[in-house]
Image: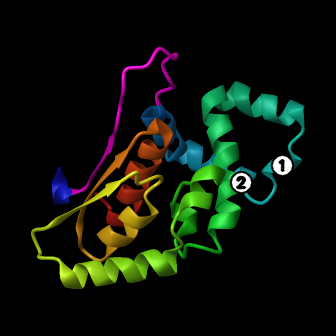
Amino acid sequence: MPGKRAVVPATRFRSTPVSPDFDAIVADLTSPEGEALLASLAGGSDRLSPAQQQRLRDRHGRDMVLLALRVAEAREGARSRFPDADRLLFVPELLSQATAHPVAARRARRMAEALDADDVVLDLGCGAGSDLTRMASVGLAVQGLERDPLAAALARTNLEAVTGE
């Protein structure tokens, strides 16, 4: 793990069907094609007709379009809470649980002052990684644990976007 940064999905044995491969879907969404899709949805994903949505699904795949619609919706709200919202990925329910930037950044600075350089911060239930990204941005070594596979995939991607690792 370069730089001691990781987000690990917590798993359990379940009798429910296997969830989609969110790591692959999120990777597709951060590709140039996915970024173009997100840009096309900015500021108006709710105005797409069912026919337009179907064309997008035919071109990009059902799972990617569903996630892109949710990320585009959340990105509008994230802009008021995160200065780097355009490079972070949230879905509405994870954004509503995310610690806003000013609070998370202040907390991260205070932790950086109090911890030793070789300490690792473990964020249990890290969600989409709002606290993780703020802690990593002040140089803390961080690891996140998240039960929701989509949230874990978003947290990994957000951490990479902020740290470049």
Q: Position of residue 105 (x, y in %)?
A: 41, 79
Q: Position of residue 14 (x, y in %)?
A: 43, 19
Query: What's the residue type where badge 1 is placed?
Result: Asp
Queried whether the magenta region covers residue 101, the answer comes back as: no
At horizontal 45% and vertical 40% (from top left) the residue drawn is 27
Q: Position of residue 161 (x, y in %)?
A: 41, 60
Q: Position of residue 129 (x, y in %)?
A: 43, 58
Can residue 79 be seen in this snapshot?
yes
Looking at the image, residue 158 lies above or below residue 111: above
For the residue carrying disc 1, how many other residues have a C-alpha within 10 Å: few (<14), some (14-19), or many (20+)? Answer: few
Majority SS type along the magenta span? loop
- Disc 1: which residue: 46
Q: Is residue 85 left or right of residue 103?
A: right
Query: What's the residue type where badge 2 is placed?
Result: Glu
Queried whether the magenta region covers residue 14, the answer comes back as: yes
**Which residue is nearer to you in this view: 53 or 67?**
67
CA gap between label 1 and label 2 equals 8 Å
At horizontal 61% and vertical 35% (from top left) the residue drawn is 64
**In the rendered structure, are the residues bearing label 1 and label 2 in contact, judged by CB atoms less than 8 Å apart?**
yes
Can residue 39 be seen in this snapshot?
no
Looking at the image, residue 132 lies above or below residue 2: below
Of mark 1 and mark 2, the one earlier in the sequence is 1
Q: Secondary structure at mark 2?
A: helix
At horizontal 90% and vertical 38% (from top left) the residue drawn is 49
Magenta extent: 5-21
- Disc 2: which residue: 73
**Which residue is nearer to you in this view: 55 or 105?**
105
Q: Is residue 106 left or right of residue 138?
A: right
Q: Is residue 11 left or right of residue 51?
A: left
**Which residue is nearer to you in this view: 25 or 7?**
7
For the residue carrying disc 2, how many other residues have a C-alpha within 10 Å: few (<14), some (14-19), or many (20+)? Answer: many
Q: Secondary structure at mark 1?
A: helix
